Image (spheres, helix red, strand yellow):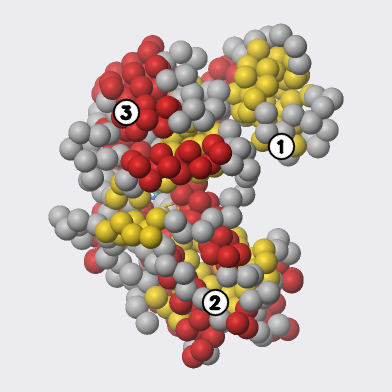
Amino acid sequence: MNLPNMLEAKKRDKSEFCIYDYEEIKLDESLVGKKYYVRTYGCQMNEHDGERIKGVLTDEGMIETDNLDEADLIILNTCAIRENAHDKVFGFMGLIKKMKETRPNILMGICGCMAQEESVVKEIMSKYKYVDFIFGTHNLNKMIKVINERIRTGKQNIEVYSVTGDVVENIPEKRDSSISAWVDIILGCDKFCTYCIVPYTRGKQRSRKKEDIINEVLKLKDMGYKEITLLGQNVNAYGKDLYTDYNLANLLRDVSKTGIDRIRFVTSHPWDFTDEMIDAISECDNVMPYVHLPIQSGSNRILKLMGRRYTKEEYLELYNKIRNKIKNVSVTTDIIVGFPGETEEDFEETLDVVNTCKFDGAFTFVFSPRENTPAALLQDNTPIEVKNERLHRLNEIVNNYSNMRNQETVGTIQKCLVTGKSEKDSNKYAGYTENMKLVNIDSDEDITGKIVNVKIDEAKSFSLNGTYIKNI
Ligand code: SAH
Ligand code: SF4
Ligand code: F3S
């Protein structure tokens, strides 16, 4: 047994990290041929980890099911970013406890970011004895070992490490899409924004080798993928921990040369965004004109308390460069309201920035105190009702600008990558414009997996409606 330790997780040393290949561990015979169910919460990086969990289990002879009732093995790949992410997982665990009353042989495990939290694991050990195993974000490659040990000993098995170091290549994957693929480029985070738990749950910043990334993209292209998204908590820091003269701008140019149709990247921290990177995005045709650039707050006082290391003015300068240099770019952001000590004036500064930037979209959150983070210790006198009311006011403004930006596309022809049937209307297809706007597309033929011309007929705040134009 190995338990997570938040103080250990905070440490960063200068030691180099290791990069090595996945080594297969054979799954216990009793599970071979049986069914597994994986549920993933959280960000795209966690989604991609979910694809690895499924890949390893499938390679070991298990079969995926999306029907919980027929699963023999259930894995919850969790997120810890805000309290409501926790609540969802604990709620779902209750359901599985019920299932176990009638089917006691089901195995249930927890992994992902919540598994890296000391308090969560201690709570599970004392109150949730029906959880069979827990593994962390740093030993996903040893998942089978953890499961096998649970089967062999019959006891709750917890293997979570807080000290990180590694990048494990070639873990089997079972990707959810055959059109658009996630590609990790940098793991962990060293930014330690004061509100954020990610540096504790994902460990130190580690870049993958450029050759490994480019080979993966070439392979995906050969398999017929049309789009890849380069992933990292802060992709703009790519290379800093591995190279002296190779960064995200170089990587974008090299990945562009693979000739894959579409290249995207998330998330960008404003602090590491260089002019060279803006040039690379604007000059490479297959790097898509879309930047997710979280601002978090428009008040310099709050930004400082958040440890974001930029001012409102610096953000605006970068924002304007991106808007001016990258043709047809869309920019979205993340905003936290109700950070400890945020006054009405601070909040109004955030509204001011939103009114200046007129973002294409924004993900907005109420501050949620996270275990062991510095912001959780700050005095916070703002009542939750006031925070919720601020969120509501912010959302109204944010949605107006999304709508405004979307209206500008009505009547234009946009190249869309069609990802499948529309979730809203099964007679339509869903596709994304180059600048990442969701379009519900009318088409008589199956255009799934293609990049097609679409005439935009109508705009709403969160999506567009359009018609497939066959011949142009
Ligand atoms: N690495 C990304 C963010 C990843 S988390 C970046 O720095 O931009 C996604 C978003 O969740 C953050 O941008 C932030 O807006 C929000 N978030 C993170 N921690 C939070 C907390 N404790 N309370 C509320 N929102 C939070
Ligand atoms: Fe969290 Fe900041 Fe790292 Fe983003 S950059 S993951 S907000 S610590
Ligand atoms: Fe959540 Fe972990 Fe991602 S906390 S947002 S799953 S890195």
Disc 1 residue type (three-letter): Gly
Q: Which residue is at the front of the view, 210 or 269? A: 210
Label disc, if present, on residue 27 of the rendered structure: 2
Farthest-out residue, left: 14
* Count of numbered circles in the view: 3
Residue shown at the point (82%, 27%) measured from the top left: 445
Residue shown at the point (68%, 74%) measured from the top left: 33
Q: Which residue is at the front of the view, 454 or 227? A: 227
Q: Which residue is at the front of the view, 257 or 188? A: 257
Residue shown at the point (75%, 11%) measured from the top left: 471
Label disc, if present, on residue 420 of the rendered structure: 1
Disc 3 residue type (three-letter): Ala
Label disc, if present, on residue 249 of the rendered structure: 3
Instruction: Classify 146 as above or below 262.
Output: below
Between label 2 and label 3, give the one nearer the viewer.
2
Q: What secondary structure is marked by label 1? A: strand
Disc 2 residue type (three-letter): Leu
- x, y percentage for residue 27? 54, 76
Q: Cβ of disc 1 within 8 Å of ligand 3?
A: no
Marks 3 and 1, how far apart at CA: 31 Å
Between label 2 and label 1, give the one nearer the viewer.
2
Q: Quadrant of ligand 1?
A: top left
Farthest-out residue, bottom: 153
